[in-house]
């Protein structure tokens, strides 16, 4: 089952105060994240936010409770250059907590740039002590990023409790990096912009602009961006490990300041060095570890970089580009085109929250599908919108995964939206992003890059465009107008224009007037000869050479044509009257097209008359029984029925009904024993020798029946050939239908005697195809030139015979046996079963002989192949399969030397002494003896006397 994300309606989290305008534009609200850390544990993101308001203050808010925690005032002429950084630290031995909030401000009057610290210490007694500190820097550009380094243990001079101590790193827009003390705000070190500009491909003195900064750890960079390769941080004396040595790393994206649009971007990886590394790098406190140009050249983008998963996402002109890192180089993974997208948040690898001016939506960037969406109308109704805040856009700020809450800034209001992921097997909510979640939710591919293909490889025609009938506003209007035009032509009885319109709709050509022979369609000459009137004004369609050449058409036009060619009788006055009737001429091209193209299926007829048959039961059976007789009524030559059998996907009901019609046209359903009596005509004549008149009547009757049989089995007439071909097609398709359904249809549509007639026809097919003839029988040498039957025909005939036997059942066989007894000759039933059993036995014997001949021929063919292969390889010289060399005589072997090393019980490998080596060598010597054969022992038959016998000690 597909698991879906759910997004609730957004709500106003907090209404913010208005900001003071800046010298270069309106004031801003800058939102930052709040972190918390306890000594000895990892730093984590808290469910709090810091909001810096120009000319007003810095506020800290708790998101779940929607309450303000604290605030810090700034002067009215001060504005913020970046988001505030707030860190809440707790001692490991007491309940004392300290909150450090760092902000970067710039005075609009004096242009003074400084970094301020607001520190609150909450004691165990509940009292709060607030202090401030500041540092005025002289960087040419404002500070654009503030972050704290990882804490280190330090023993306080005033007590014995452990306090987490950290430093502050400030990055300016020109690439200058400052290191400040986390409590006193004193400058500890400073790096020049040349640290970043020297890595550019242009001149090292080129001025740069910092576009993006993110602090992370070395372990996350190694695992996410370099695939676990630890060689990158070889400058450190220790090996980087997540739980032991894990230095701070800064990911910086820069671009040349004077570059043309679009700008070339560069990725820098900087690491904070320790005391030992600083001495090795000439007292540099920050080291450039890696630098590489980015493949993207987009300008004015919003960037998000997740080092742990190795994913870089940037937004430009409504297109979200996702890159994955391989050895530190990003490669484009996918593109997500969402018009009017203003900001985004990465929820997971398979989910992105996107904001537009009117809505919030969750997309799957991998499969480019929409997972969930909601409108911003609820927020607009509840919040107070000032006059200058009418056309603001929503800027997404952060996502709290533990709370499943995304927070954004909409004008002067903080808004929040709840995102619920489906629960997994472990009862935890997780957005898996499966392919099943993206079905029927895909986005349009317009504007996206197409897949590269070779010039000599043309795209498939079937995939080059939409299927006929794909819904669109223009097509829907055009379809209604064409249907109205066709109805009007039918009301005016203008069938020529009507069929011309449908020929254009079905993409079938029309022949010219001169191409017609006396105004009559060539296929309808038989109906002309039978006296059927032909509408000479009907156009003649150009039929394709094969049914596979018919083009794809809209199914709505097929339903419309069926509804106009046929009519449904809903009245229940006459129970025997057919429900389905035909109201068109036999020469109608539309009817011939529906039959020949295979559109006259039961499902299409049900769709065409869905309003009339909605309350009717067993519609499939009614349509299957009435459609073949209706086609025979329209075309008595059964040519239309043959096209219907050949080109349409049929069920057992339609096939059994068609077989019944063909056999009835052969006049075989009046007496089921006709085909059998034709074979025993001579026996009947011998039994009726006494009555010459009866004998002549029976002979005439047998001759007529023989003519009927020959007519069916392959007379030269066109009708006979057409009916025989129709029976073959019907038998082939009926054998492919399910056995149970076929048996039920045979019981419902055929009487037991009619089923017996069908079995007789199948038996004649068995005889005609030669399955009852012995392979070694040479009596039919005149038929050797005829083409043999298909190998699978025996399977079809046997399967159908079994189904016919099952359809009659035990009661049917008893009834049929009584019927044969009532005919006056009880021996007929016995003869029928004897003949049936004999034919089956002969067929099985033929199969056994065929298997035996196949085995014999297979042996001869395999021997011939091996002989040909041996002759072909005889002239080739083969290299010897072994190398000649010094070898021991047969029966002797070379003993291996004892090993000079041995493994003791503790696993230690020690060297053997010479005495131990000699001992093992003597053990390998086999025992031997010296025998003396005396002359006396040979004469007396005695044994050999052993005089010396030794063994290895």
Image (cartoon, rainbow, N blue to C red):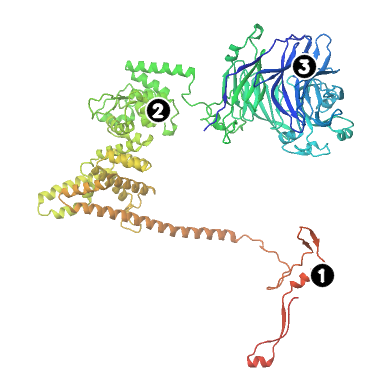
Q: Which mark is residue 770?
A: none
Residue drawn at (61%, 32%), measured in percent from left and top?
453
Please give left or right for residue 909 compared with residue 416 in the image.
right
Residue sitting at the far top: 387
Q: Position of residue 686 (x, y in %)?
A: 15, 55
The answer to whether the residues at label 2 and label 1 have Cβ atoms under 8 Å apart is no
Q: Position of residue 467 (x, y in %)?
A: 48, 26
Give the secondary structure at mark 1. Answer: helix
**Does residue 934 sit above or below 418 in this rendering?**
below
Circle 3 crowding by C-alpha within 10 Å: few under 14, some 14–19, many from 20: many
Give the secondary structure at mark 3. Answer: loop
Q: Could one spot residue 787 in this view of the protein?
A: no
Q: Could one spot residue 393 in this view of the protein?
A: yes
Residue drawn at (23%, 40%), measured in percent from left and top?
667
Please give left or right for residue 98 compared with residue 856 in the image.
right
Name the residue beneath numbered marker 3: 81
Q: Nearer the viewer, residue 275 or 25?
A: 275
In terms of image quadrants, where is residue 846?
A: bottom left
Give the secondary structure at mark 2. Answer: loop
The answer to whether the residues at label 3 and label 2 have Cβ atoms under 8 Å apart is no
Q: Which mark is residue 915?
A: 1
Circle 1 crowding by C-alpha within 10 Å: few under 14, some 14–19, many from 20: few
Q: Quadrant of the C terminus?
A: bottom right
Of the numbered discs 2 and 1, the one sitting upstream in the chain is 2
Name the residue beneath numbered marker 2: 542
Q: Position of residue 752 (x, y in %)?
A: 24, 43
Q: Position of residue 147 (x, y in %)?
A: 78, 24
Q: CA distance from mark 2 to mark 1?
A: 105 Å
Nearest to the eye among marks 2 and 1: give it.
Answer: 1
């Amino acid at each position: 089952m597909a698991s879906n994300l759910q997004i609730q309606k957004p709500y106003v989290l907090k209404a913010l105060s208005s900001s003071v305008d800046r010298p270069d534009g309106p004031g801003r609200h800058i939102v930052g994240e709040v972190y918390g850390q306890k000594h000895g544990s990892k730093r984590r993101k808290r469910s709090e936010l810091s909001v810096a308001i120009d000319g007003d203050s810095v506020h800290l808010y708790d998101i779940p409770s929607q309450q303000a925690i604290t605030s810090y005032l700034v002067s009215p002429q001060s504005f913020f250059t970046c988001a505030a950084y707030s860190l809440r630290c707790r001692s490991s031995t007491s309940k004392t907590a300290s909150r450090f909030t760092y902000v970067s401000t710039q005075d609009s009057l004096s242009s003074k740039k400084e970094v301020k610290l607001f520190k609150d210490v909450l004691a165990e007694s509940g009292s709060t002590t607030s202090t401030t500190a500041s540092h005025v820097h002289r960087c040419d550009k404002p500070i654009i990023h503030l972050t704290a380094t990882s804490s280190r243990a330090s023993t306080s001079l005033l007590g014995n409790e452990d306090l987490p101590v950290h430093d502050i790193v400030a990055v300016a827009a020109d690439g200058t990096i400052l290191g400040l003390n986390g409590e006193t705000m004193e400058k500890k070190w400073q790096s020049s912009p040349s640290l970043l500009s020297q890595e550019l491909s242009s001149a090292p003195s080129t001025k740069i602009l910092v576009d993006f900064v993110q602090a992370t750890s070395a372990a996350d960079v190694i695992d996410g961006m370099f695939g676990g390769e630890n060689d990158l941080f070889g400058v450190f004396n220790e090996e980087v490990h997540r739980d032991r040595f894990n230095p701070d790393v800064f990911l910086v994206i820069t671009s040349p300041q004077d570059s043309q649009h679009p700008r070339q971007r560069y990725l820098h990886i900087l690491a904070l060095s320790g005391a030992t590394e600083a001495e090795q790098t000439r007292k540099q406190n920050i080291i450039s570890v890696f630098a590489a140009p980015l493949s993207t050249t987009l300008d004015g983008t919003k960037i998000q970089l997740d080092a742990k998963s190795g994913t870089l996402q940037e937004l430009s002109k409504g297109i979200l580009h996702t890159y994955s890192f391989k050895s530190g180089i990003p490669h484009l993974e996918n593109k997500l085109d969402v018009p009017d997208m203003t900001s985004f948040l990465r929820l997971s690898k398979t989910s992105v929250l996107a904001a537009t001016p009117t809505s919030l939506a969750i997309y799957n960037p991998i499969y480019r599908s929409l997972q969930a969406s909601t409108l911003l109308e609820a927020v607009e109704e509840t919040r107070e919108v000032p006059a200058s805040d009418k056309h603001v856009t929503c800027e997404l700020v952060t996502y709290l995964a533990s709370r499943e809450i995304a927070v954004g800034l909409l004008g002067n209001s903080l808004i929040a939206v709840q995102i619920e992921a489906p629960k997994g097997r472990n009862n935890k909510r997780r957005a898996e992003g499966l392919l099943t979640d993206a079905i029927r939710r895909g986005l349009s591919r317009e504007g996206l890059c197409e897949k590269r293909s070779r010039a000599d490889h043309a795209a498939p025609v079937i995939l080059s465009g939409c299927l006929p009938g794909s819904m669109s506003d223009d097509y829907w209007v055009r379809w209604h107008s064409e249907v109205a035009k066709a109805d009007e032509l039918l009301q005016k009885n203008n069938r020529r224009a009507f069929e011309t319109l449908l020929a254009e709709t079905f993409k079938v050509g029309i022949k010219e007037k001169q191409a017609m022979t006396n105004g009559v369609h060539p296929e309808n000459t038989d109906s002309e000869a039978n006296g059927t009137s032909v509408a000479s004004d009907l156009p003649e369609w150009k039929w394709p050479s094969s049914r596979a050449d018919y083009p794809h058409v809209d199914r709505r036009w097929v339903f419309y044509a069926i509804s106009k060619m046929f009519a449904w009788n809903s009245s229940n006055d006459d129970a025997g009257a057919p429900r389905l009737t035909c109201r068109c001429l036999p020469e109608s091209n539309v009817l011939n097209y529906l039959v020949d193209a295979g559109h006259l299926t039961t499902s299409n007829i049900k769709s065409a008359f869905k309003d009339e048959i909605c309350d009717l039961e067993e519609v499939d059976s009614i349509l299957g029984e009435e459609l073949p007789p209706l086609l025979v009524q329209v075309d008595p030559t059964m040519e239309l029925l043959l096209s219907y059998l050949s080109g349409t996907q049929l069920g057992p009901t339609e096939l059994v009904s068609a077989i019944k019609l063909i056999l009835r046209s052969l006049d075989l359903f009046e007496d089921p024993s006709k085909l059998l009596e034709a074979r025993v005509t001579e026996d009947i004549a011998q039994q009726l020798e006494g009555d010459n008149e009866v004998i002549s009547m029976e002979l005439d009757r047998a001759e007529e029946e023989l003519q009927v049989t020959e007519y069916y089995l392959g007379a030269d007439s066109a009708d006979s050939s057409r009916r025989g071909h129709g029976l073959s097609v019907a038998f082939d398709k009926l054998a492919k239908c399910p056995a149970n359904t076929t048996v039920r249809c045979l019981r419902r549509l055929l009487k037991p005697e009619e089923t017996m007639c069908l079995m007789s026809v199948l038996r004649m097919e068995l005889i005609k195809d030669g399955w009852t003839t012995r392979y070694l029988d040479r009596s039919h040498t005149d038929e050797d030139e005829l083409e043999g039957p298909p190998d699978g025909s025996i399977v079809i005939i046997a399967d159908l015979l079994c189904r016919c036997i099952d359809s009659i059942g035990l009661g049917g066989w008893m009834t049929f046996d009584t019927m044969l007894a009532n005919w006056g000759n009880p021996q007929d039933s016995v003869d029928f079963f004897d003949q049936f059993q004999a034919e089956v036995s002969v067929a099985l014997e033929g199969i056994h002989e065929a298997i035996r001949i196949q085995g014999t021929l297979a042996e001869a063919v395999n021997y011939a192949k091996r002989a040909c292969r041996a002759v072909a390889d005889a002239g080739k010289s083969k290299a010897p399969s072994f190398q000649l060399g010094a070898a021991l005589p047969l029966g002797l072997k070379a003993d291996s030397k004892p090993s000079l090393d041995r493994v003791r019980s503790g696993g230690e490998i020690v060297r053997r002494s010479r005495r131990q080596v000699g001992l093992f060598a003597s053990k390998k010597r086999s025992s031997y003896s010296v025998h003396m054969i005396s002359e006396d022992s040979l004469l007396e038959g005695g044994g050999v006397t052993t005089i010396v016998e030794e063994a290895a000690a």
